Image (cartoon, rainbow, N blue to C red):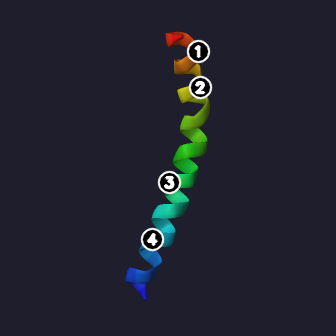
Amino acid sequence: REVQDIPGVLAVFAERRKDSFGPYVRLMSVTLN
């Protein structure tokens, strides 16, 4: 059961990371371009 929960936890972590890094990546793109 714990092993099956790991992909879900990683998916949620990835989504949160993507949401938090999104604006930063956009800012860097604007700065570099």
Name the mark on residue 10: none
Residue at x-position 58% and y-position 15%? 30
Q: Could you tell me the amino acid type at mark 4?
A: Pro
Q: Earlier in the sequence, mark 4 or mark 2?
A: 4
Q: Earlier in the sequence, mark 1 or mark 4?
A: 4
Which residue lies under the disc numbered 3? 14
Q: Could you tell me the amino acid type at mark 3?
A: Ala
Q: Secondary structure at mark 4?
A: helix
Q: Are marks 1 and 4 in contact (CB under 8 Å)?
A: no
Q: Position of residue 25 (x, y in %)?
A: 53, 28
User: What is the distance, in whole Å, between disc 1 and disc 3 at their CAs?
Assistant: 23 Å
Vertical arrangement, residue 24 with respect to residue 32, above or below: below
* Mark 2 residue crowding within 10 angstroms, few (<14) / some (14–19) / many (20+): few
Q: Position of residue 22 (x, y in %)?
A: 59, 35
Q: Could you tell me the amino acid type at mark 2?
A: Arg
Q: Are marks 2 and 1 in contact (CB under 8 Å)?
A: yes
User: What is the distance, in whole Å, between disc 4 and disc 2 at their CAs?
Assistant: 27 Å
Q: Are marks 1 and 3 in contact (CB under 8 Å)?
A: no
Q: Are marks 4 and 3 in contact (CB under 8 Å)?
A: no
User: What is the distance, in whole Å, between disc 4 and disc 3 at their CAs?
Assistant: 10 Å
* Mark 1 residue crowding within 10 angstroms, few (<14) / some (14–19) / many (20+): few
* Mark 3 residue crowding within 10 angstroms, few (<14) / some (14–19) / many (20+): few
Q: Earlier in the sequence, mark 3 or mark 2?
A: 3
| 19 on left or right of 17 | right
Residue at x-position 59% and y-position 25%? 26
Q: Earlier in the sequence, mark 1 or mark 3?
A: 3
Which residue lies under the disc numbered 1? 30
Q: Earlier in the sequence, mark 4 or mark 3?
A: 4
Residue furthest to the bottom in view is 1
Which residue lies under the disc numbered 2? 26
Which residue lies under the disc numbered 4? 7
